Image (cartoon, rainbow, N blue to C red):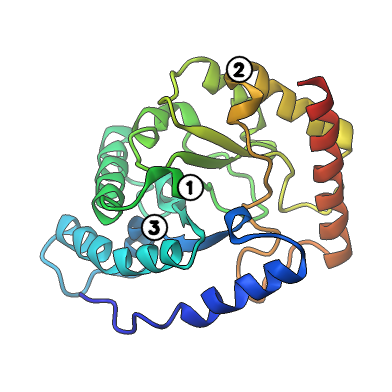
Amino acid sequence: MAYRDARAAQPDLDRLPRALAAAGRSTADAFVTAAFPGVIAMSHANLHYPTHVAYVAALADAMAVEYRAVIAAGFSPRLDAPDLEMGRHAAWADASLTEFRDIVALHIAALNQATASLPPERMRLHLCWGNYDGPHHHDVPMRDIVDLVLTARPDGLSFEAANPRHAHEWRVWEEVTLPDATYLIPVVIDTTPNDIEHPGLVAERLTRFSAIVGPERIVVSADCGLSPIAGYEPIDPDIAWAKLAALVEGARRASVTW
């Protein structure tokens, strides 16, 4: 397996600095999404490799090209890894928890292999249980995988923290010891319903996290995506902007108390 066109991502990488400059921002403020090796393995059947292990390793080698290109362009790659969470109730629903944890460990090892030469402080990892409107009652709990997730090389850790199934899991961070450089990026607005969060609720959620790990280790973001799949818009665009405005105001209110 090989990355067939190393220039394929370049048009976007060239376009983004111009958009940032127009908004008065620098490339240091921006990240570019990139697929986790494991999520590619989850969504694209292995037709050529003798084992899942070999397939994921080959994917890691191929995707390393894209990760390096993102950093070379001055951005942080955000490595999207729904295989580590959504994979539990999707591709590996019939596996035991122990077997699924082995898959999580394998996929994280592949990511660490792919990014071995890249600076951890320039990368962020995004966890996702599937950004869709559904019951989510078969989601794997954060508590069952957090120890493995914390072995990943990226310093930034983004995760859903506002939907009805996972909003309570802020308490998980009271139970673990973060690596020294790790910072949290909790997604504190729900990205599937058309409700607009009150800024006070946003501030409350952020304050819970900051009380556990410290405000200096919190980045405010909504990077689970308000339209996560091309052509799929679960949220009205005007409401999406209003939710983002509530996020900004909530972050402002929380920072006053920090």
Dot 3 alpha-carbon crowd within 10 angstroms: few under 14, some 14 to 19, many 20 or more:
many
Q: Which mark is residue 50?
A: none
- Which is nearer the eye, 104 or 112? 112
Q: For numbered disc 1, what is the local secondary structure? A: strand
Dot 2 and dot 3 residues touching (CB under 8 Å): no
- Numbered disc in front, either 3 or 1: 1
Q: Is residue 197 above or below residue 240?
A: above
Up-down relation of residue 236 to residue 146 (above or below): below
Residue at 56 percent of width and 41 percent of height: 159
Name the residue beneath numbered marker 3. Answer: 36
Looking at the rendering, which quadrant does residue 72 occupy?
bottom left
* Residue depth check, mark 2 versus mark 3: number of the one nearer the observer: 2
Of the two numbered discs 3 and 1 on the same chain, state the one appearing first in sequence: 3
**Left or right: residue 248 compared with residue 138:** right
59 lies left or right of 35? left
Position of the N terminus, as image quadrant, is bottom left
Q: Which residue is mark 2?
A: 212
Task: Residue 188: give x, y in percent of width and height.
Answer: 71, 39
State left or right for residue 69 relative to residue 45: right
Can residue 16 be spotted in the picture?
yes
Q: Is residue 71 above or below residue 48?
A: above
Work out whether mark 1 precedes mark 2 in sequence or the reverse, and give the earlier one.
1
- Rendered residue at 43%/61% (across/down): 71
3D distance between C-alphas at marks 3 and 1: 11 Å
> CB under 8 Å between callouts 3 and 1?
no
Residue lying at 62% horizontally and 21% vertically, measured from the top left? 214
- Left or right of residue 250, residue 120 in this image: left
Give, as a three-letter code, the residue at label 2. Ile
Q: Earlier in the sequence, mark 2 or mark 3?
A: 3
Q: Residue at x 84, y 25 (%)?
A: 256
Amino acid, disc 1: Arg
Name the residue that disc number 1 marks: 124
